[in-house]
Amino acid sequence: MVNSLALLGWGPPDEVEVRPIEEIIELFTLETVNKSAAFFDVKKLDHINAEYIKALDPVRFAELVEPHMTGDDAPWPVEAYRSEVVEALAPEIQQRIATLSEAPSWVSWIFAPSIDNYDEKSWNKAMVKGKASARVLDEVVSALDAESFDDAEALEAAVMGVGNRLTEEMETRVMSQAPVRVALTGHSAGIPLWQAMTLLGKVSCLDRLRAARARLD
């Protein structure tokens, strides 16, 4: 906020706007203040705030975002919250938000007991219209059941391997990641799945995949 306010009617000579207040003080001169009326731009404030969020180390980010994760309006049982999950996924979350209050939406599926409400557009595209989605879910469950869930790259290989095998067998492109993402998160977009799956855990992942398969029937 201070950084943003300092730029109202003034700008540093090198045009680097996001910088420590100490540098702003050193560069500031009254002679370079614009005589025209200043315009407060909320979008610019969001951009500046996003840059400061990106610069936080994961531990500090997890500390600052915790009140938004454990408040009365938290979208999951408070006891389900685990700060180590946010810390582990901090780099992915930080790249996607402009304010700390946006953070819960990116990890709500991890802390939720189950996925009860699927985004209908995502469900229809990945499950109803997706090629061989039922087989994808069946074979992904089988493949992941053999995994220990401590290696994100192994989970990626298992899921993508199902799509590759079905593509070769059916001689048409079969997407395996899309139905898996919708089954686990309820949506077609979000942070990368693989590390998040290790944090969600084997039991929850398999339960959600089986639940989605049953709903598909």
Image (cartoon, rainbow, N blue to C red):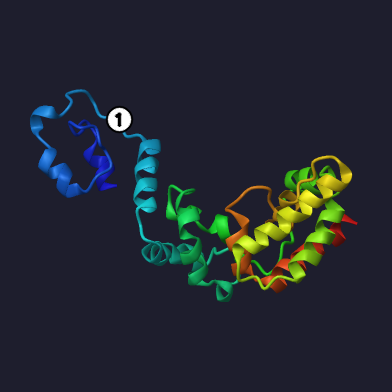
Mark 1 secondary-structure assignment: loop
Q: Is residue 180 visible?
A: no
x 38%, y 41%: residue: 47
Q: Nearer the viewer, residue 174 or 183?
A: 174
Residue 192 horizontal/vertical position (percent): 59, 54
Residue 143 horizontal/vertical position (percent): 77, 65
Kind of residue sitting beneath label 1:
Phe
Label 1 crowding class (10 Å Cα cut-off): few <14, some 14-19, many 20+? few
x 77%, y 46%: residue: 126
Considering only vertical position in the picture, is 3 above or below 108?
above
Considering only vertical position in the picture, is 113 above or below 19?
below
x 68%, y 48%: residue: 188
Q: Nearer the viewer, residue 112 or 143?
A: 143
Kindly give the residue lying farthest to the front in the view shown.
168
Considering only vertical position in the picture, is 168 above or below 116?
above
Q: Is residue 214 visible?
A: yes
Residue 28 horizontal/vertical position (percent): 12, 37
42 sits to left or right of 27: right
The residue identified by callout 1 is 39
Residue 29 horizontal/vertical position (percent): 9, 34
189 sits to left or right of 10: right
Kindly give the residue lying farthest to the right in the view shown.
217
Q: Quadrant of the C terminus?
A: bottom right
Kindly give the residue lying farthest to the bottom in the view shown.
79
Count of marks placed on residues: 1
140 sits to left or right of 27: right
Q: Nearer the viewer, residue 120 or 73?
A: 120
Please identify the quarter of the rendering in which residue 15 is found.
top left
x 21%, y 23%: residue: 36
Please identify the quarter of the rendering in which residue 215 is found.
bottom right
